[in-house]
Amino acid sequence: MKPGIVGNDIDKTAFCGKGVLVRGMHDLTRHLVDVLSEVYILPVGIAEPLQQLDLTSIALDGHPMLIETEHLNFKVFHDDEDRLGLYFEMFLHIDIPAGYVRFDEKDEEYRANVLKSFPALRGLRNLLKILDGHF
């Protein structure tokens, strides 16, 4: 992964498919979804279960190779080709020195798909129950 902005231009080769992977953490993911639903004033949607959200990313600010020492700002895209009908864009801020990761809304039009995608994540407990039934 490399910086996406060179000078004042977007480096189109800097888009990274599956550059960010989001996995469910059961209760924590549920809490995030509940907070988003409350803030967006929208109900939680329903979608087919997902093992993870594969987010295409581009670094808008900061160098991804320096993730441990500087604030990074990414633009992320889910379901790029809208195959699942869950396309959305968000901004992702990662600041390890300050101790936080934050998603920021890109546009209100993506709220419904965000509220379908995040709750579709299978939490680790659910995944273990599914695997246990097959082995």
Image (tube, grey):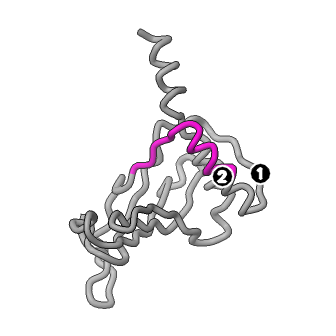
Name the amino acid, label 1. Pro
Describe residue 67's horizontal placement relative to residue 48 as left or right.
left
**Which of the 4 quarters of the picture holds residue 72?**
bottom left
Magenta residues span 21-34
Q: Quadrant of the C terminus?
A: top left
- Going from the N terminus, do you reach mark 2 or mark 1 first? 1
- Dot 2: element: helix
Give x and y (percent) for residue 113: 63, 55
Give x and y (percent) for residue 91: 49, 69
Q: Are the residues flagged by discs 2 and 1 in contact, CB closer than 8 Å?
A: yes
Name the amino acid, label 2. Leu
Q: CA distance from mark 2 to mark 1?
A: 8 Å
> Disc 2 marks which residue?
115
Q: Residue at x 47, y 57 (%)?
A: 80
Q: Which mark is residue 43?
A: 1
Q: Which mark is residue 27?
A: none
Describe residue 90's horizontal placement relative to residue 73 as left or right.
right
Give x and y (percent) for residue 21: 40, 49
